[in-house]
Amino acid sequence: MKNQLFYGKDKVRADSIVNWCKEYISEYTTANQSKDMADSGDVVPHLILWKPFVGGSYKFNIDAAIDVCHLRVGLNMVIRDHTGFMMASSAQRINAIQIVEVLAILRGLVFTIESGLLPVVVESDTLEVVNMINFGSHIHAEVCLVIGDIREFQNFISSGYLNFISRKANTVAHNLSNEANHFWMESCPPCVEG
């Protein structure tokens, strides 16, 4: 949906995003209620409350939430003491697209090394990420460790150049985005043939 929203010829309507979110939440709620009922043996769903940890330790709860409309991820956390008193809490928003693009570059370098297809030049259509890796510009905390790993791999293969290219020049990789968890060697799936 991200790529269609940003790069597609047709704009994604807000009501279609909202409908998708409602359906997703409904399915999630139904699945969790079914699991809770199966685990407890109850026929009627019951309310599950937070419980303090026995032994006087602090308890740390964390959750990640996806804001599909703004393409962000929220990381939310709470630390409570053994009585349930809230000692600290945090809600952080991060740019999900940036993180995924950085992880894609790291995974691409690993894939290249594993495949033995060296030397290599890496190309990405996300200029901000290319600049972060190449020049250290505006590196955000949530991606700095992954960028460090990318730089280590670039040094290891001593030819890991990273260049920016336009979206139109990157259509083959873009078309693979819906082909999750597949591997091809000396061939390609029908979505990129042509």
Image (tube, rainbow, N blue to C red):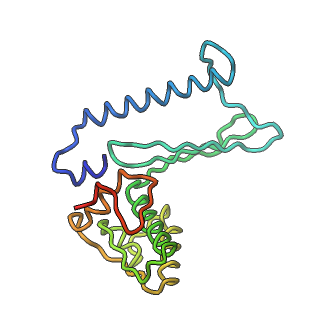
Picture residue at 26% right of the left edge, 34% below the top = 16
The mark total stands at 0
Picture residue at 33% right of the left edge, 73% below the top = 123
Quarter placement of the C terminus: bottom left
Return the residue found at the far front.
Answer: 186
- Residue 157, position as x, y percentages in the image: 49, 83
Return the residue found at the far top.
Answer: 43
* Quadrant of res 118: bottom left
- Residue 117, position as x, y percentages in the image: 44, 78
> Seen in the image, is 103 located left or right of residue 45?
left
Picture residue at 48% right of the left edge, 71% below the top = 147
Return the residue found at the far left.
Answer: 9
Q: Is residue 74 above or below residue 20?
A: below
> Seen in the image, is 72 located left or right of residue 77?
left
Picture residue at 48% right of the left edge, 73% below the top = 115
Q: Is residue 15 above or below residue 132?
A: above
Q: Is residue 85 above or below residue 6?
A: above
- Residue 135, position as x, y percentages in the image: 38, 79
* Quadrant of res 172: bottom left
Return the residue found at the far bottom.
Answer: 158
Q: Is residue 92 above or below residue 49?
A: below
> Seen in the image, is 162 located left or right of residue 45?
left
- Residue 143, position as x, y percentages in the image: 48, 64
